[in-house]
Amino acid sequence: MLFNRLIVAAIVAAAPALIAAQGAQPPQPPPTDTVTPAIAGVCAAGTKVVVIKSGFQGTEGPIGMPDGSLIFTETQANRITRIAPDGTTSTFLENTNGSNGLAWDAKGRLISVQTTPGQTKIGAIYPKGSEATLSDSFDGKAFGRPNDLVVSTKGAIYFTDPGPNVTPGAPPPSPPLPPAVYFVAPGAKAMKVADGIERPNGITLSRDEKTLYVNNTSGEYLLAFDVKADGTLANRRNFAKYDGVTTSATGVNSGADGLVIDEQGRVYVATSTGVQVFDVKGTLLGTIPLSRAPQNLAFAGKDKKTLYVVGRGSAFKVDLMTAGFKGRGK
């Protein structure tokens, strides 16, 4: 009996090391509601951040629908899920080619970055009959793992490619494209418009579409670029410094992922510490805390005053004083 207890104790003690060695993550505690601090013009102190549901298989690419609902991608399940205004969930679209970031274009098409290995591309996936590949390579090389995108009111697409996810111990794709930001004008091929960013991730445009914002997951700063008349970029600069950045032997990590703007041009960034809110000058106004690190976010609802946040298999929402930008789908 004593021998059996010793064996069980040894297995329990070794479990964390075995999980780490296999690259798996230990189970997370259930997500819980949180409350916000006061953020001027955004939310009152004590505003509740509500858990909608957990247990999703990947959580990315949220975007509002015309009927006030929200859709987001479950990348691991290869589907898009809808959250109705009453909080109920349903399958919106299946077989999405590993869609991650989503955006609407002026034609009412749902455009996605698609990440299935060997089939990476930017394309229209909805409504049925409008499916099309808009870009699948640069300089004759397939994209590594495109991540997020924004579509301008003129139909121009900007998207990030931080490079492929490489399995530990496995060789990287050969030859890989380095991390970059790409621009696709309507009917044209992809053009590289920014590189030298360690891990470009979330991306969006300012209200007047004269500034492009890019998150850098492996950096200290949210980046900004001027958008030139031909769609190319200039004047790269550090727009805002993330709060809570960590540095380790593997490098800098902000956890900066998705981002979105509101009607006043404030920028909301999903980071390791929560949703950080910056004003138009890049000053941090405050952070909306969540019980799980967020991955992406979007405004939705009939008045677009509900901020939906997804991350680590869970979905949340918080009602704000301000509305999301209504001039584009994202």
Image: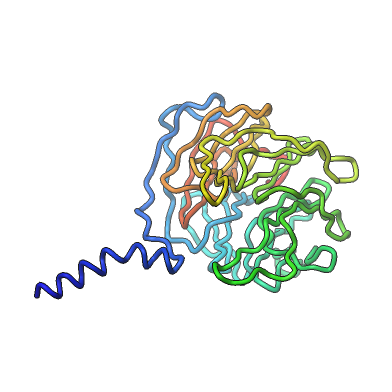
Q: Is residue 105 left or right of residue 148?
A: right
Q: Position of residue 54 (x, y in %)?
A: 42, 56
Q: Residue furthest left?
A: 1
Within the image, what quadrant is residue 226 found in? top right
Q: Residue furthest right?
A: 230
Number of marks in the rendered image: 0
Within the image, what quadrant is residue 75 found in? bottom right
Residue drawn where x is 64% and y is 45% of the image = 216
Residues 204 and 176: in front is 176
Q: Is residue 30 left or right of residue 318?
A: left
Q: Position of residue 328 (x, y in %)?
A: 72, 44
Q: Position of residue 253 (x, y in %)?
A: 55, 46
Residues 287 and 218: in front is 218
Within the image, what quadrant is residue 50 found in? top left
The way the protein has been coloured in the rendering is: rainbow
What is the quadrant of the N terminus in the image?
Answer: bottom left
Is 71 above or below relative to 260?
A: below
Is 320 above or below relative to 152?
A: above
Q: Residue furthest top?
A: 40
Q: Position of residue 276 (x, y in %)?
A: 55, 36
Residue drawn where x is 42% and y is 67% of the image = 21
